[in-house]
Each structure stands twice: as structure tokens, then as C-alpha cells.
Image (spheres, grey):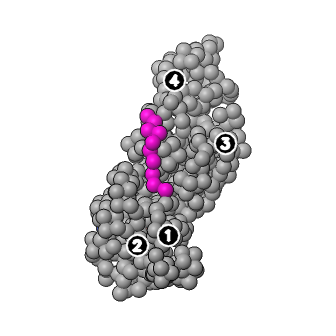
């Protein structure tokens, strides 16, 4: 390649010009000089495909805007950036871009979690890059460290707050005593909720991100269907107060870990000790705690959403893909060589908190203790206080399989000494795990 070739302009086209796409277009224009120096050649935006080409888009050159996404995808530019979202037509457009020889940068967690394999295979077949740093935890550099910096280590566990909206809601419930419905309405007013709020509050958005993290961390194919998913809609003020009284805070966690010769990937609300680094992650921020055999514990923290923060991650990928084009190579591809079985949540080892309303008479504690013992679950702490003519009992367990803890709760619910099960939640992040 001649030095003239080395300075040829690198072309970039956007599929999508919404919250993220508009910010990417703006940074490409405003930071053109810096990007040119960092890449080693000018980076030129050639087109922005949108649904409605007539809509005003401040900061985007109107002559670049088109509603012909198929033509943009197959235009053969160096890098196609997919920021339109959804499964189709995004998947077909990405595949068309790769067939045309373009590297692809995407922020589309839903597509990657549903059918990442098809995209990875197409990238391999066509000898192009597929980067997706923005798909998990927005601006936070997280996937590249997992893919590259930790490639010589063995990751054992990833524990993260990867949905900013639910973290905002749980923070308000914890700090201000606001109830679930009130804080859900506030998240809506602030524009935090996805168009389908269930993606946030029922944990599906976090589950898609957990699948992507697990796949990279454990070199094993993981899709959204493999992820156990429970949202925050059943978190009550009773749970919040109980957590506070015990020195815990409730977070929606995405957990991907090795267990029983396989991996378990789960998303659910959990109690964390207030001393845990993830406990201090407030509001709409994200953070991911990674444990690896040689490196030990690491935490990645920052903004998980928003146009500019997400565009920062997209641009980092664009620069990486552009540099690879200039050097005539490719970045590291995906490898699922470990091919570990993805196990059901029952195989996960967790601790539990169980809050019970029980009859206040002799022998009650013994009947409850034997429900735990029958299922091989060891009790760590029991706290009792009055609840009118009944007694309130909070039990925290040692680590046991999720399946045996569930069986314990079922058995407790059937005891005549137990009036009501007021709350049940997993406890993560205690010392000794
Ligand atoms: P958005 O604001 O809804 O923008 C989507 C863009 O895609 C719009 O410009 C829309 O055109 C265009 N589009 C949608 N369907 C199209 C189609 N069939 N043909 C042509 N254009 C189409 O979405 P966003 O918030 O920027 O999110 C984009 C992606 O980034 C999603 O995958 C999302 O999950 C991911 N992401 C977003 C964030 C965030 O904070 N927003 C954070 C991380 C990841 P119109 O403008 O004409 O409607
Ligand atoms: N709904 C997501 C969140 C947007 O709240 O984190 C970023 O993926």
C-alpha cells in the first residue's frame, strides 16, 4: 500500500439518526480533525438513513439524509454504523453491509442477544469487523477489556448494574421512600423509560446485556432465552426497609458466572451489602464488577445511556474499525470455543433473605428451621420482631443452590405456622463468595 493509500479518506455511513445516531453524526463533524489524526486518515460521513427523511435533524447535513436504508447498507463504505435498533430490518441491513465488504459498528443489544451468532459468522465470512461496545453499559469501556485486555485471564464472574432506568428507580425508593408506581411515573416524565417500559422494569433490557457479557466473558454462545429474568415490579417498601435494617441495598443485578461445569446467567433484584462497590452506584449510572482468576476484582463505572455517552462508545469502535481498514487487518473476532453448557438458574449458588409473618407460639421457630434443614439450606441469621398478634421473622441463609432455596420457600409457604411470606430475595456480594 502506498503512503497515498494510507491517507485515503475512510467512509462511514449511519443506519439511524435518532438519539444515538444524531450524536455520532455531530461528533464525526465536530471532531473531524482529531479523528483524522487518531485514525491516520480523514473520516468522512457519507449518509444517514432514517425512516422519515423530511424530519428536521439539527446538526446533520440534510444532503446526507435518506430513507433508503438498503442502499446505504450496501454502499460499500468502510464502516456502517447501525443505530436504528430492533431485530429487522437491522439484521438484514447489517448482513448486507458485511456482504458489501463494510465493517459494522452497532449499539443494538436486542439483536446481538437474539442472534449475535449470525452476525459474528457473517463478519468472519466477509473478513470484516463487528464491534458493539455501546450495546452494553453505554459509554463504559467494558466489552473491549473483556474481549482483549482479559483475553489472557479466566473470568469467573460478572456482576453488573446495566439498566440505568431501574437503578434510578431503586435509588429513589431507597433514599427517598418513594413507592414503585410514583417512581415509575417519574422515570417516564424524565424520558428514561424505553418505548416499551417492560424492557426496563421487567429486566429484559438487562437480560440482553447479560447475554452479551456472558458470551464474551466465558467464550460460550449465550442468547436472551438462556437468561433467567425477573424485574423490579415486585420490590416492595417492606423489602426496602428490611434491606436498610440489615445494612443492605436492593439493586437489579445482571449476574453471569461459572457454576457446576457450565455458566448461569441471571437478572433479578438482589440485596447487596452497602459496603459492596456496586451498592454506591446511584441514579441512572451503570457499573459492572468483574472477577477474574489472575486479575482479581475490577469495577467499570459510568453512564450507561444517553445520546452523547453512547456515541462516545460508538466512535471508539469506528476509530478501531477504521484503523484496521487502513492497516489491512481485522480486530479479534468472537470465539465461543469453550462451548460451556448454559445451566438453569437452579444451579446458581446464592444466599436468600426470607421475610415471614408467623404465628407467635412455641415451636414455630423449630418448624421453620426444619424447612430450611430439609432442603439442605443453612441459616446464617434470624431476626424476630412483633407484628401484632403474629411475629415477624427475617431469615438470611448461607450459600445454597437456587433450586434448594426455592424449594425451601415453597415448603415454608405451606406451613400452618407461616401466615404470610412477606418477601423473598437473593443476597449477593457478601464476603466469602
Ligand atoms: P432512536 O432515537 O429511536 O433512533 C432510531 C433511528 O433509527 C431513527 O433515526 C429512526 O428514524 C431510524 N430508524 C428506525 N427504524 C428504521 C427503519 N426501518 N429504516 C430506516 N431508519 C430507521 O433510537 P436510539 O435511542 O438512538 O437507539 C438506537 C440504538 O442504540 C438501539 O439499538 C438502542 O438499543 C441502542 N442504544 C441506545 C442507547 C440510548 O441511550 N439511546 C444506549 C445504548 C444503546 P426516524 O428518526 O425517522 O424515526
Ligand atoms: N433503557 C436502558 C437503560 C437504555 O435504562 O439503561 C440504555 O441501554
**Could you classify mark 2 by the number of other residues whose Cα lies within 10 Å: few (under 14), some (14-19), or many (20 or more)?**
many
Q: Earlier in the sequence, mark 4 or mark 2?
A: 2
Q: Earlier in the sequence, mark 3 or mark 4?
A: 3
Residue segment shown in magenta: 332-341
Residue assigned mark 3: 294
Q: Is residue 125 left or right of residue 60?
A: left
Magenta stretch holds residue 38: no
**Could you classify mark 4 by the number of other residues whose Cα lies within 10 Å: few (under 14), some (14-19), or many (20 or more)?**
some
Residue assigned mark 4: 404
Secondary structure category for the residue under label 2: loop
In this view, the residue in front, 356 or 276, is: 276
Q: Nearer the viewer, mark 1 or mark 3?
A: 1
Question: Can the viewer see residue 122 in this picture?
Answer: yes
Separation of disc 4 and disc 1 at Cα? 54 Å
Q: Nearer the viewer, mark 2 or mark 1?
A: 1
Q: Position of residue 105 (x, y in %)?
A: 43, 65
The answer to which image quadrant residue 325 occupies is bottom left
Q: Are marks 3 and 4 in contact (CB under 8 Å)?
A: no
Disc 2 under 8 Å from ligand 1? The reply is: no
Q: Is residue 415 left or right of residue 57?
A: right
Secondary structure category for the residue under label 3: loop
Q: Are marks 2 and 3 in contact (CB under 8 Å)?
A: no
Q: Earlier in the sequence, mark 2 or mark 3?
A: 2
Magenta stretch holds residue 334: yes
Residue assigned mark 1: 327
**Could you classify mark 1 by the number of other residues whose Cα lies within 10 Å: few (under 14), some (14-19), or many (20 or more)?**
few
In this view, the residue in front, 33 or 49, is: 33
Separation of disc 2 and disc 1 at Cα? 13 Å
Q: Position of residue 254 (x, y in %)?
A: 53, 45
Q: Nearer the viewer, mark 4 or mark 1?
A: 1
Task: Report the residue that reaches farthest toward the front.
Answer: 2
Amino acid at each position: 500500500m502506498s503512503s497515498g493509500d494510507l491517507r485515503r479518506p475512510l467512509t462511514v455511513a449511519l443506519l439511524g439518526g435518532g438519539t444515538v445516531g444524531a450524536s455520532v453524526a455531530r461528533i464525526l463533524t465536530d471532531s473531524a480533525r482529531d479523528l483524522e489524526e487518531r485514525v491516520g486518515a480523514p473520516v468522512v460521513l457519507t449518509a444517514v438513513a432514517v425512516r422519515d427523511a423530511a424530519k428536521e435533524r439539527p446538526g446533520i447535513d440534510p444532503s446526507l439524509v435518506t430513507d433508503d436504508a438498503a442502499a446505504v447498507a450496501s454502499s460499500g463504505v468502510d464502516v456502517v454504523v447501525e443505530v436504528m435498533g430492533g431485530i429487522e430490518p437491522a439484521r438484514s441491513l447489517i448482513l448486507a453491509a458485511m456482504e458489501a465488504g463494510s465493517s459494522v459498528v452497532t449499539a443494538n443489544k436486542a439483536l446481538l442477544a437474539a442472534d449475535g451468532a449470525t452476525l459474528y459468522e457473517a463478519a468472519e465470512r466477509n473478513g470484516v469487523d463487528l464491534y458493539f461496545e455501546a450495546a452494553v453499559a453505554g459509554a463504559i469501556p467494558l466489552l473491549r477489556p473483556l474481549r482483549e485486555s482479559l483475553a489472557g485471564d479466566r473470568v469467573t464472574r460478572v456482576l453488573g448494574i446495566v439498566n440505568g432506568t431501574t437503578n434510578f428507580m431503586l435509588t429513589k425508593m431507597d433514599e427517598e421512600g418513594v413507592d414503585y408506581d410514583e417512581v415509575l411515573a417519574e422515570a417516564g416524565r424524565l424520558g428514561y423509560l424505553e418505548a416499551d417500559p417492560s424492557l426496563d422494569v421487567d429486566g429484559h433490557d438487562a437480560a440482553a446485556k447479560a447475554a452479551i457479557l456472558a458470551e464474551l466473558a466465558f467464550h460460550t454462545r449465550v442468547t436472551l432465552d438462556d437468561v433467567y429474568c425477573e424485574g423490579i415490579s415486585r420490590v416492595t417498601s417492606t423489602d426496602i426497609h428490611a434491606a436498610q435494617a440489615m445494612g443492605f441495598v436492593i439493586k437489579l443485578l445482571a449476574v453471569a458466572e461459572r457454576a457446576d461445569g457450565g455458566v448461569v446467567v441471571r437478572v433479578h433484584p438482589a440485596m447487596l451489602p452497602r459496603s459492596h462497590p456496586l451498592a454506591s452506584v446511584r441514579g441512572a449510572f451503570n457499573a459492572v464488577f468483574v472477577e477474574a482468576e489472575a486479575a482479581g476484582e475490577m469495577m467499570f463505572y459510568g453512564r450507561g445511556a444517553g445520546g452523547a455517552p453512547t456515541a462516545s462508545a460508538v466512535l471508539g469502535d469506528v476509530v478501531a474499525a477504521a484503523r484496521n481498514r487502513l492497516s489491512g487487518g481485522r480486530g479479534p473476532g468472537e470465539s465461543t470455543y469453550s462451548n460451556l453448557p448454559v445451566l438453569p438458574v437452579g444451579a446458581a449458588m446464592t444466599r436468600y433473605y426470607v421475610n415471614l409473618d408467623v404465628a407467635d407460639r412455641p415451636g414455630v421457630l423449630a418448624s421453620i428451621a426444619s424447612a430450611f434443614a430439609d432442603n439442605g439450606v443453612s441459616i446464617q441469621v434470624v431476626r424476630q420482631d412483633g407484628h401484632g398478634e403474629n411475629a415477624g421473622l427475617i431469615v438470611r441463609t448461607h450459600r445454597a443452590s437456587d433450586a434448594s432455596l426455592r424449594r425451601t420457600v415453597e415448603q415454608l409457604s405451606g406451613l400452618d405456622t407461616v401466615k404470610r411470606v412477606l418477601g423473598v430475595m437473593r443476597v449477593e456480594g457478601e464476603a466469602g463468595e
